[in-house]
Image (cartoon, rainbow, N blue to C red):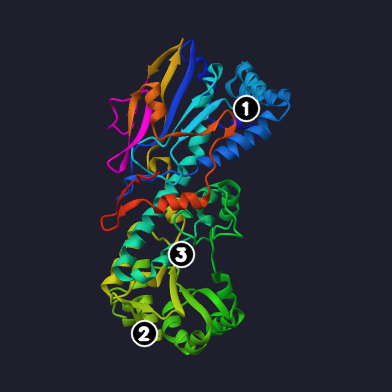
Amino acid sequence: MNPLLLTDGYKLGHKDQYPTGTTKVYANWTPRKSRIENIDNVVFFGLQYFIKNYLIKQFDTEFFSQPKEKVVTEYKRAVDHYLGVNYDVSHIEDLHDLGYLPIEIKALPEGTEVPIRVPMFTIVNTLPQFFWVTNYLETLLSNIIWQPCTSASIAKQYKTILTKYAQETDVENLDFINWQGHDFSMRGMSGIESAILSGMGHALSFTGSDTLPVAINLEKYYNTDVTKELVIGSVNATEHSVMCAGNKEDEIETFKRLLETYPTGILSVVSDTWDLWKVLTDYLPKLKEEILERDGKLVIRPDSGDPVDIICGCDHEDPTIAKGVIELLWAAFGGSLNTQGYKVLNPKIGAIYGDSITIDRATQICERLKEKGFASTNVVLGIGSFTYQYNTRDTFGFAMKATYIEVNGEGRAIFKDPITDDGTKKSAKGLIKVYEQNGTFTYKDECTLEEEKEGLLTTVFKDGQLMQDQSLQDIRMLLSKTQQDVNSFKITAIVDI
């Protein structure tokens, strides 16, 4: 599709609504409010995907490289019938004649944690007659970028929590945290691109993921190579259809067959198709010899019920249910005490829970395992669409707002500040300088042109060209350098960018 049609319909008239003589429109992208407890900084991620896929690839292939008459006729036909007018498309013809998008985007590095209300990037037209292009792109830009930022921020919060408890209960096994949060969200996302964008955000903090197309897209847009570095990974795992096909009465035989099919490596088996507790107290003890002699780990996956109670146990008249999965695995297979005095399961056995995990439930699971004397690293958490799809652009209040224009050569600082609002929608004013102060990012608005150039925002796209090209490895390293107080979950943005 012609990418100029990927916009809100009300954008079509804005070119004629700006003051006569307008030659420049300058806007910024900012998270304005956090609706998730303990997240006060938002991970910036996804702009490079947007630039490469839309501003370069789709504009080149579906607009600039297409015959002018074809794309202009298509555009006019759609808009004429949409608005019921004889729409003037001369500005579309002029853009096609130019042959590139005359805009400049200046941004912080992707992987940066940005405090709420601090701009992540700015966008401005580079030629006066194309002042209308800046905010024309708002709809498409907003549609694409809010989700990878949001999912990357939520994934980072999961990692902060898991890191906190691992440091308290299993400091010798901190590398395991990279696998402890596993992306199970693809089937529940709103579409393929949604799953990919969210999954790439997850992959900044974790290497465990079942969203397979994430790997290919990180190669394509973030300069990685699955043959040379660990991008994402997973293990052999069953689903309920496999277990059902083996018959309820012969479920232990299904376990035997799977252990023989996969004599080495990690094998995850969904274990609550019928009776999870029977699997844990009957089948697994009977298969103990095969499991311990196997060159690998068997991972038990419960997939229903309250995840905190299932994993950790709860007050229940049935002593089996009261113990929960981890304690029952300990009873059957034992393990060891680490240097901090916490129980770590035998490396031949483990557990993963992949249904309805939330930040709060993840915290409760880790806390209750700790209270029972178990290391938090005894369980992997499958993070699915219950976490990543129950969000909107308003989760972090993302918005792109114009704050500066030039009319007849005169610069004007513009802003919005609705009297009916609580302050969330109040925008910055004028040109913006983002800078570091006391170990975190802040900004100054109503800047001079000279001050704006001194800030930390650097040009990443200009006049159809990508000016900076980050890699997944660089972004992961940048995010991991963030200074954080894991005991209070408060995060301070990096200084050494």
Q: Main secondary structure of the magenta part?
A: loop
Of residues 343 and 420, the one nearer the viewer is 343
Q: Is residue 426 magenta?
A: yes
Count every numbered label the image shows and give the total.
3
Q: Residue at x 41, y 15 (%)?
A: 411
Tell me, for residue 331, which label it has, or none. 2
Mark 1: few/some/many CA within 10 Å (<14, 14-19, 20+):
some
Residue identified by numbered label 3: 179
Residue segment shown in magenta: 414-442
Tag of residue 100: 1
The tag earlier along the polypeptide, 3 or 2, is 3
- Disc 1 to disc 3, how far (Cα)? 42 Å
Quarter of the figure that contains the C terminus: top left
Sequence-earlier tag: 2 or 1 = 1
Circle 2 residues within 10 Å: few <14, some 14–19, many ≥20: some
- The residue mark sitting in front, 3 or 2, is 3
Up/down of 483 relative to 81, above or below: below
Splitting the image into 4 quarters, where does residue 363 fall?
bottom left
Q: Amino acid at mark 2?
A: Ala
Circle 3 SS class? helix
Front position among marks 2 and 1: 1
> Is residue 81 shown above or below 250?
above
Residue at x 52% of width, y 48% of height: 197
